[in-house]
Image: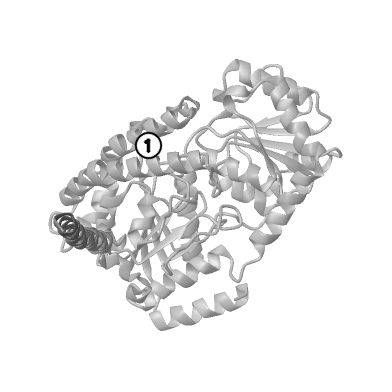
Amino acid sequence: MNGRAAVVFSLIWLVSFGEGAKILTIMPLGGKSHDIIGSAFAKTLAEAGHDVTVITAYPVKSPPKNYRQIVLTGMLEKSGVANMNFFDQHGGLISSLILLAFMYHGFPAMLYEGCMQHPNVEKLSNSNEKFDLVILESFLAEPFYGFAQHFDAQLITFSAVANTLWTNHLVAAPGPVSHEAHFMLHYTDRMTFSERFVNTLVTLIDAVFYNWIYLPKQKDFYNQAFPNAKLTFEEQMRNVSLVFLNQHFTLSSPRSYPPNMIEVGGLQIEEQKPLPKDLQQYLDEATDGVIYFCMGSNLKSAQFSVGKREAFLKAFSKLKQRVLWKFEDDSIPNKPANLMIKSWMPQNDILAHPNVKLFITHGGNLGTTESLYHGKPMIGVPIFGDQMMNVEKSVRAGYAVLLKFSDISESSVSQAINTVLNDPKYARNAKLTSERFRDKPMTPKQSVVYWVEYVLRHGGAPQLRSPAMELSYLQYHSVDVLAVLLLILIASSVISLYILKKIYRTIFKSKVSKSSKKKRA
């Protein structure tokens, strides 16, 4: 379906529906990158003619006309997210598990107090408004699912990262640990035995924490927020119509999904816009190319230690290429002549420029997707979360080089840059991936509009739901059947041994009897 056909189809549906649907989009996490994806959903649906209300900590400056914002004022300051140094989260497996445990322990209360109990949200909850649909990020926000029945609406969730334990169970999607790595690990879909062992162990630990420690807390918050709910917490968790994933198989790996789990990776990517005059000139005049350096929205380059910052500066000073660095301070000591810094940069529009030859990134999902959409090779400096996995996949696919945070030095930075720029395979593989990523029957925006309206047209689209949703954990994994088979095998073995023993004793007694008769004779 091309863009024009999608628009025509959407307009026909809107005419039949009336004035478009009333949609509530909730982004309770307070993470900028997560909010960017949530805003992309909201803007896409508003531009398609729907009446969208957005609960967010990051209001959009120029929203569409039918895009209302309920701002979580003061939430970021109260939570301390705005002042956190995320470089402190850097570490290996143990650090990742500690971070995951911290999220399970600290996030439920923080999100409940910061968003659910926010005066602006309570005002909306106590109003007489009705919505046709609630769209909510699934990142540790299960109590918020209750807003769907509170407003008598259908429920769709989205994941700003990949499919995880948290999303898979919503639609009974399989997640085999043999080739689907836990998102907090740095493994790809091709693991050694030791990696599969660790992946299985971590996934099991996560499942125990999630089901026995985390979810009971979320259930308590759900019951506090929606004491008159018709559906129990468990029933509401099973009442999700659709799950959108911010990923695409060309950038991650092919996975098995039920029909109500949809990939829309790249949804946040807009059409290229004109750059500010100074940036346009800086890029246009870079005859030897440009390196773009950005550590994302949560990680701030200004928080690099002096030693690591100097390592980058010294390596940059020896390059013939120009460098653009998203750096949150107005000035930087010892800045070389070929470096331009800005506290904010239009990343997508910069990566679209033909003179950009390399992207130095932390390996976040958004930046990685945008870089590969425009066919740019990368140097990955992962810090925490899914960044390690994203960079590892990029390295395995041949369009990126890993630069470990602990190994940052002038020589390691220079070596990584020279490796990518001087070996054409990195740019070639990035362009090949870009071609594959762009080759789709529908754009991510068209997919969102189609499937959201499909759910609305079909009253929650129960026909999409897997029958596995009706099974218990033991039934889903056929543990009960395997147990019966094991009992049958044990019983058969016992009976067979008993029969063999009887036969043996009969034969033995017969031989003894014959032997005795011969001796007497």
Q: Position of residue 481 (x, y in %)?
A: 26, 64
- Residue drawn at (59%, 41%) of the image: 392
User: Residue 512, relative to residue 307: is it above or below?
Assistant: below
Q: Position of residue 23 (x, y in %)?
A: 37, 64
- Residue drawn at (15%, 55%) of the image: 516
Q: Position of residue 60 (x, y in %)?
A: 48, 50
Question: Disc 1 residue type?
Answer: Leu
Horizontal relation, residue 425 to residue 101: left or right: right
Q: Which residue is mark 1?
A: 100
Give SS at disc 1: helix
- The N terminus - image quarter: bottom right
The residue furthest front is 521
Nearest the viewer among 487 and 413 is: 487
- Can you tell which quarter of the image residue 114 is in? top left
- Can you tell which quarter of the image residue 458 is in? bottom left
- Residue drawn at (39%, 61%) of the image: 173
Q: How many marks?
A: 1
Nearest the viewer among 124 and 87 is: 87
Nearest the viewer among 210 and 471 is: 471
